[in-house]
Image: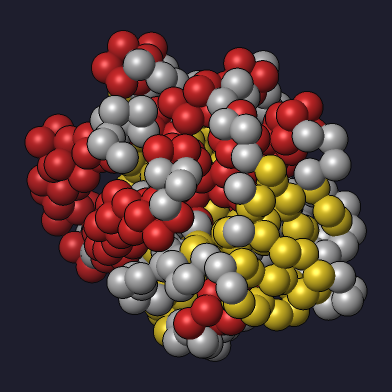
Amino acid sequence: MKIVIAGAGIGGLTAGVALLKRGFDVTILEQAQALKEIGAGVQLAPNATRVLYQIGVGERLEGLACEPPGKRVRLWNTGQSWRLFDLGAASRDIYGFPYFTLHRADLHQALADAVYALSPNAIHLGEKVEGVKQTGGKVEVTTVQGNVYEADLLIGADGVHSRVRRALFGPDEPVYSGVMAWRGVIDAEKLPEHLRSAYGTNWVGPGAHVIHYPLRGHKLINFVGAVERDGWQVESWSEQGTLEECLNDFANWHEDVRSLISAIDIPYKWALMVREPMTRWSSGNATLLGDACHPTLPFLAQGAGMAIEDGYLIARCLERYKDDLPQALARYEALRLDRTARVVRGSAANATRFHNPQLAHAEGAAEYVDREWSEERVKERYNWLFEYNVDTVEV
């Protein structure tokens, strides 16, 4: 079976490795002229790292990733701290695989290298999808550069602004969530020692929250600050803001948060848009994965994880039903639709939880955090995610 994957991001490359390992003929089209990822961190829970070990990438990442011993919740104004959940050795003991925080570029490079090792000419750079045509049980992909690729299956892994999705289902209708996010990567040496903690930290406050965690052997700290505000609706990862504007959004926050912001080299800002989960991903000999079909707010730290699971499971389904493509795609959708929709909705619920007005004052906030981040509530929100096993789900 000849398969064309549109997009060499994390999901597309994971699918590429998983399919190549199963003997499929894979071509990956990437619009960028060079394979490079944006400067940002990514969290991978054990449901995702399981996949990376299964496709031979996990060990390579061990020297590049950090394994936080746990996560903490801190209060926006007082800095009071609560345990969220334990990770590190606990993640390996309970779920069988680690919880990684790592630089997106390191993950991306490891996946690209795995593709190249299996098929040196699989990735075609500078190829942006222009059109998709299906005839006679085949799919033709035309690129802006004028090249035509014919395949038995097209997988659209081309992100939140997916051209494949638009070709199959028409334009989507994103709605501004009311939240925009700041991101930046910080040189850890610029920070006081207590802010170089190995732990991941979620600061929660009325109308905003901040997340930070270590990268690259604790040499870097990833920062994300989400704030409810109007007036910024550009859905892009490459729009630069200013430190002054970012500090202004967190004007009365704890000095630790302001120290983190002040140490960012270049703060980037992007509008967080919401889309209703799609009820169908496939049309004829084409389907979607990752952000192309279930973009999510980043508040469960599962966006990359869902794309990685998609990539592995579509390979399992195609191997299981290699002589029946409609059945393979139907099974893939059946496995993924509910789980990814639950992530989309759970992420939106976390935005409300992280920004609750009850967090405004220390006395009400402590009671709220004790309740919302009790061990029982945390297990309800995260265990179903972390326990998922891509190898044992029935395809």
Is 256 left, or right, of 222 in this rendering?
left
Question: In percent of the image, x 31 and y 21: which residue is there?
Answer: 95
Quarter occupied by the C terminus: top left
Q: Is residue 222 above or below residue 67?
A: below
Is 2 left, or right, of 207 in this rendering?
right
Give the x, y percent position of residue 68: 47, 24
Which of 269/368 is in front?
269
Which of 234/127 is in front?
127
Which of 258/70 is in front?
70
Work out whether residue 98 can be spotted. Answer: yes
Give the x, y percent position of residue 139: 63, 69
Work out whether residue 252 can be spotted. Answer: no
Which of 171/137 is in front?
137
Question: In percent of the image, x 56 and y 26: which residue is there?
Answer: 55
Is 55 left, or right, of 96 in this rendering?
right
Question: In percent of the image, x 10 and y 36: which residue is there?
Answer: 376
Q: Is residue 190 above or below residue 230?
A: above
Question: In percent of the image, x 88 and y 76: which residue is there?
Answer: 146
